Amino acid sequence: MKIEILTENPLHHASAALVIGCFEDAKDELYAALDSELGGCLARLAASREFTGKTNSSRLLHTLGKLPCERLLLVGLGKRAELDSERLRQAAGTAMQALRSARVASFSSALCQSVALPDALEAVATGSLLGAYAFEWYKTKDKEERFEGFEAMTLLLPKEADLEAARARVEASGSIAQGVRLARDLVSQPGNVVTPGYLADTAREISGRHGLSCRVYEMDELIAMGMGALVAVGKGAAEPPRLIVLEYQGAGAKGRPTVLVGKGITFDSGGISIKPGAGMEEMKTDMAGSAAVLGTMAAAAGLKLPLNLVGIIPTAENMPDGKAFKPGDVLTSLSGTTIEITNTDAEGRLILCDALHFAQKYKPVALIDLATLTGACVVALGHEASGLMGNDQRLADALQRAGERSGERLWQLPLWDEYGEGMKSDIADLKNSGSRDGGTLKAGWFLKQFVGATHWAHLDIAGTAWCDKARPYCPKGATGVGVRLLIEYLTGR
Ligand code: BES
Ligand code: MN
Ligand code: ZN
């Protein structure tokens, strides 16, 4: 979608559709002027309660020559005092859904005009760009009937706005949205397309485009390095596991990096401890952590952030096979810690434990992992927040704040040592799964054993990576969670 930015008066601006924001409890000058041109139509809609300005509501009108815009799209902003950037992002997303249903591909938006938020422009740009997203790679029928996608958006800013600065801010929102779209695409893609090899190719492609360095460790190297846990998980699949490492240097060679680690299980059948059939298809999303890392690396490079960043992705398919690892096996992880397998479906913590140990060689200022790690986290927090755990309260607090600002909320869970009591093995140092109770915390505690003294946070995104219901700026399916959160954290205030 092409984006143009103008300081034209919306009243005199010609377009196929003009989007304006309306509060429930306050009517501004623009609203009054449009209402008078339309002969009191807006007041009539409010009086009959057909459109009152409630959040995430919208109403499309044809202006029949009474205004230079062919259509007027009213979008609810709720109560004036309650407006924040998340509501504005949602309003912008709601507008996209209404425009999509009406098949209006080019439009102008005056959403920024009704609000005094400092980051209104970013919110409108982000909500629009993400609201425009659809995953339609595999739809081959009824091409004519389907909406072809958005072509152009014109953002109308107040006349005193600094256009140069506005362009830069919108461009930045565009880089972030591109990272989110990449993550959504990767998660939406089926497991027969997105394999460990595909993730490696994607990482190489991103590196080429943005000038990052990229190294992909293959099976023989993983064995030689001693990554016994990652190798074990990948053994049962036809497609071998990989360790992908991306490096972005925005602060010179000396600065210690922030290291991001993403779980990249491209399909989780459960392995020999196989999962029940119902819903197993959703396990193509078990690489959402890796998608978030790739999207964040691309966005950070696109934004030219002045910091160093390393992205590490352990990736494998978890499959049952004659060669697969089995319950009872004992593995030696990269750190030397031995692990008795009690459930091959607790594979995420295995590939992560090797990656987290590996990450320490970068001496990270902060180490953050993202993983669709436990079903228990979905039970605990549903789809509204990712689980946050770690060994450093300042890092956890900073991430939590970034979650509030980005709308990708986090909720902290404890990692007390008591959770480890059930994770001790009779014959090895650890076992990879304990009893069901406190499953998210036991998984987190397990990871904690591999980070040493590094400032570390773990985000369990099992409930937030995929959504069964559409939201204003996220269709049903992959959310791309993590990208906006991490960029907000990295650029953090
Ligand atoms: N990938 C799953 C967790 C998951 C569940 C992600 C639902 C997204 C939605 C993970 O590998 C897994 O299977 N976890 C097990 C752990 C158990 C065997 C200790 C779980 O949560 O049941
Ligand atoms: Mn599993
Ligand atoms: Zn898994």
Image (cartoon, grey):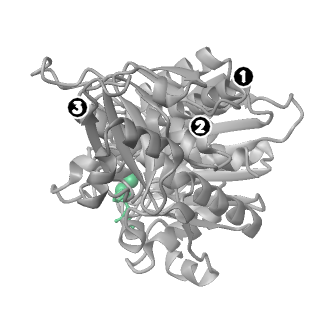
Q: What residue type is labelled 3?
A: Ala
Which mark's residue is nearer the viewer, 2 or 3? 3
Which residue is located at x 61 percent, y 75 percent? 415
Q: Which amino acid does label 2 sit on?
A: Thr
Q: Distance between the residues labelled 1 and 2?
A: 25 Å
Among all residues in the image, which is located at the extreme left? 142
Q: What element carries label 1?
A: helix
Which residue is located at x 48 percent, y 63 percent? 79
Answer with left or right where residue 28 lies relative to residue 98: right
Q: Which amino acid does label 1 sit on?
A: Glu
Give residue 451's position: percent from left, percent from top: 69, 58
Q: Name the residue under label 3.
A: 102
Could you tell me which quadrant the N terminus lies in? top left
Q: Earlier in the sequence, mark 1 or mark 3?
A: 3
Residue 318 seen: no
Q: What element carries label 3?
A: loop
The answer to whether the beta carbon of the residue marked 3 is less than 8 Å from any atom of ligand 1 is no
Q: Name the residue under label 2.
A: 296
Q: Name the residue under label 1.
A: 164
